[in-house]
């Protein structure tokens, strides 16, 4: 047991519980700045939500996209190509990507002198952490600073008998034990619609249960409408205004009953109805850390009510994005090591760009048109469809649009939405503009490549 108390001479001692994007980024930055860093992780270095959810889902979507492109080969002047999914090859591909990324993160941490412990951590007091290794060995650490970045896990309601075979959570589906022939997806948020797109591309018959009257209920209605039409064109069954309340499984098939009496039948059902924070068994009460609904309350420096205890990633209750977690981790390291005594920029969560990897892709940043109107805020909105783009016609995909929201008085870019091919890449232009306070005139005066989809951003600014 380490009996030396915090505040002793020597490097600042930081103990990080949770090795996701927030924890690993904090660890590497703090170590570079001279801290003595210990990182505790029980599952996968790099984060379960990141490497077991986010990355595999995007890999599967990329495979589905390749299949769709080959099916549409005739539209590009090619002979028809028959293609089918090699499920085991896909599984191997995903595991290989996960392993390579975990090895990369682990190597980076080790190169910076970060001490890695495989196990779980629990605070026993504001400055003490009890570590239980996977081997069962218990170790006690004292820390000047503690960073909590334990992430989240899929929410499972009482009425959902998850068996990981027929009834799956999102974490059971990268990939699932077998390819569903008829998949029912419950939940029409970001994760749900990505699963719909993914398995539809693989050839599954998909039913999406939508509890409200539009998919992506938190997004711009115009954006949601494009995706809804795409799903309908692809044969996806949409049960609008249907709230699931029970699931029955006989081992061969499943039935989902909705509160209005409608029933969806399929071979598998997948739950995509949100997540809950991994805040249990962290010793938050023993350390005196305040929470709200399981999330650690943080200030603009990611500090809890205990000024030496920080939280990053999903556990912080901010946007559940890997990019946000990584930025929080970097900011925490800088704050702990005294760099924020100099002028610096706090994280502006309202200007975080996000993307949905469906077909077409969807991305947005900053102020949304519908939210601004609901608040009575004066804005200027301009929208240009990709149908005017030469590159979109070359790609044989002119779906979607670029929408820019700006301040009518100053022309400053406040945000925007993009629906279409490569939207996740294109939104970076608007994200930079919104973060840097650029104006629509700045975008108009930029010389974009021709032919390129990015030209539509300039046209929407004009």
Image: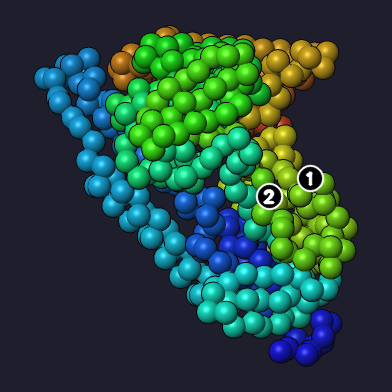
431, 216: nearer the viewer: 216
Q: Image point 56% across, 37% down: which residue?
A: 160
Residue 206 image position (x, y, % from top left): 40, 23
Residue 167 image position (x, y, % from top left): 46, 38
Q: Dividing the image into 4 quarters, which one contains the N terminus?
A: bottom right
Q: In terms of sequence position, does the residue under pointer 2 or pointer 1 come before the other?
A: 2
In terms of image quadrants, where is residue 431?
top right
Residue 241 image position (x, y, % from top left): 61, 14
Q: Image point 83% across, 57% down: which residue?
A: 304
In the drawing, what numbered circle is on residue 293?
1
Residue 211 image position (x, y, % from top left): 61, 20
43, 373: nearer the viewer: 43
219, 49: nearer the viewer: 49
Q: Image point 32% across, 41% down: which residue?
A: 178
Tag 2 residue = 277
In terms of image quadrants, where is residue 87?
top left
């Amino acid at each position: 047991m380490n009996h030396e108390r915090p505040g002793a001479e020597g490097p600042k001692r930081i103990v990080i519980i949770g090795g996701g994007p927030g924890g690993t980024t904090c660890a590497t930055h703090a170590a570079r700045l001279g801290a003595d860093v210990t990182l505790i992780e029980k599952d996968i270095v790099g984060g379960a939500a990141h490497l077991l959810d986010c990355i595999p889902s995007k890999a599967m979507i990329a495979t589905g996209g390749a299949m769709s492109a080959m099916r549409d080969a005739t539209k590009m002047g090619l002979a028809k190509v028959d293609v089918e999914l090699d499920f085991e090859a896909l599984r191997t591909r995903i595991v290989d990507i996960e392993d390579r990324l975990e090895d990369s993160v682990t190597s980076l941490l080790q190169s910076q002198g970060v001490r890695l412990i495989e196990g779980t951590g629990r605070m026993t007091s504001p400055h003490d952490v009890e570590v239980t290794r996977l081997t069962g060995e218990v170790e006690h650490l004292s820390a000047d600073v503690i960073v909590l970045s334990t992430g989240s896990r899929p929410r499972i309601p009482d009425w959902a008998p998850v068996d990981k075979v027929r009834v799956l959570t999102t974490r059971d589906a990268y990939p699932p034990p077998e390819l569903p022939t008829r998949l029912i997806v419950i939940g029409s948020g970001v994760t749900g619609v990505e699963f719909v797109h993914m398995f539809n591309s693989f050839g599954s018959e998909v039913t999406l249960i939508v509890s409200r009257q539009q998919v992506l209920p938190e997004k711009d209605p115009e954006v949601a409408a494009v995706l809804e039409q795409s799903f309908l064109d692809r044969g996806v069954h949409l049960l609008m205004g249907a709230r699931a309340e029970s699931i029955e499984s006989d081992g061969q098939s499943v039935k989902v009953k909705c509160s209005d009496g409608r029933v969806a039948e399929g071979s598998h059902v997948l739950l995509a109805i949100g997540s809950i924070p991994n805040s249990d068994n962290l010793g938050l009460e023993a350390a005196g850390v305040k929470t709200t609904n399981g999330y650690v309350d943080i200030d603009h420096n990611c500090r809890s009510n205990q000024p030496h205890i920080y939280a990053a990633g999903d556990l912080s209750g901010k946007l559940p994005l890997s990019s946000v977690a990584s930025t929080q981790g970097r900011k925490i390291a800088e704050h702990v090591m005294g760099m924020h005594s100099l002028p610096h920029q706090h994280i502006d969560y309202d200007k975080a760009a996000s993307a949905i990897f469906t077909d077409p892709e969807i991305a947005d940043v900053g102020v949304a048109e519908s939210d601004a109107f609901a608040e009575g805020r004066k804005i200027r909105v301009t929208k240009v469809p990709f149908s005017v783009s030469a590159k979109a016609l070359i790609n044989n995909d002119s779906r979607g649009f670029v929408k820019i929201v700006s301040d009518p008085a100053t022309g400053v870019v406040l945000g925007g939405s993009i629906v279409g091919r490569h939207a996740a890449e294109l939104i970076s232009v608007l994200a930079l503009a919104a973060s840097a306070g650029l104006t629509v005139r700045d975008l108009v005066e930029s010389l974009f490549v021709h032919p390129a989809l990015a030209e539509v951003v300039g046209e929407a600014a004009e």
